[in-house]
Amino acid sequence: MRDSFSGYHPLVNFLYFALVLVFAMVFMHPACLVISAACAVVYSVYLNGRKTIRFYLVFILPMLLFTMLLNPAFNHEGATILTYLPSGNPLTLESIVYGLAAGGMMAAVVIWFSCFNTVMTSDKFVYLFGRVIPALSLILSMCLRLVPRFKAQIKVIANTQRCIGRDVSSGGVLTRARHGIRILSIMVTWALENAIETADSMKSRGYGLAGRTAFSIFRFDRRDRAAMLFLLAMGAYVIAGAAAGGLAFRYFPTIKGAGAAAYTISLFAAYAGLCIMPVILNIREDLKWKAIQSKI
């Protein structure tokens, strides 16, 4: 499925992910955590399809439950004592709720980063930071595409070795280990050669030299300006509301947070609007496309 938000200017994409990632790590209010995680899941499913739901159920959900169970084992703060552990330490409601909140925060950040890796491609990253920090931007862009390229290349190598009878899924343990080591050796050799070729290629193109010009297909148009203004307005409103205590929430010694006042609800609405913005843009573009198709 095509993501229209990926077609926006890289500065808009980067600002969006910077806001949602920072807010996801800073705001520990349960409503903010639910909004962040829910919007991240929806956008990730829109980007990568329903196959990602299995990943969430297999990896993200166990991580969430593990954090919820692990925190009370080491954190015994809180005024609401539910029972006592065999070690004699109290099991408190606050520690369980805080563990759940911490797990939700980590899950949301992981999902947001998966969306970031899909939308913020290496060419966008180099476009934004190539002139400011050319060496670091190149390294970061290579790191961002490292895992996908390695996964694709190791599949090619494994399939090639399988064709000549060196399959890692057949034979004895020693035979499979020997074939696996051979594939790993080929992979390391390919990675080193690729790194040298990339360095020579960038050097021959004058990357990082003073006065070097670069071609770019990105243009900051009226659509990008409207999206940027929306992000800045929503981000500023949420930050101002958080500074005023509208998103305050504590877990120890007792659970207490900002009441459900009209101002607090407006902050939640602004935060939700900020997080769900790409999905809304995609739905709007899908509706436009369907309307055009219906007229053909």
Image (spheres, rainbow, N blue to C red):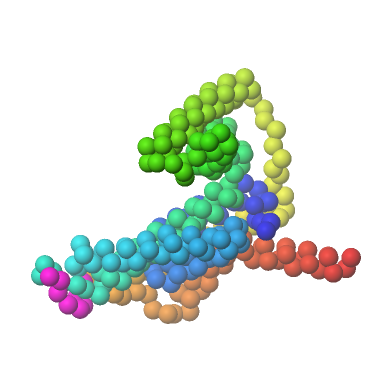
Q: Nearer the viewer, residue 224 or 112?
A: 112
Whether residue 145 is visible: no
Q: Nearer the viewer, residue 148 or 270?
A: 148
- Left or right: where 10 falls relative to 222: left
Residue 16 drawn at (x, y percent) = 55, 55
Q: Residue at x 69, y 56 (%)?
A: 2
Numbered-mark total: 0
> Residues in magenta?
78-86
- Left or right: where 11 falls relative to 188: right
Q: Nearer the viewer, residue 192 or 131?
A: 192
Which residue in the rendered view is the most extreme toward the front? 171
Residue 168 drawn at (x, y percent) = 46, 41
- Left or right: where 86 falls relative to 266: left
The image quadrant of residue 281 is bottom right
Q: Nearer the viewer, residue 214 or 263?
A: 214
Rendered position, 249 above or below 261: above
Whether residue 35 is visible: yes
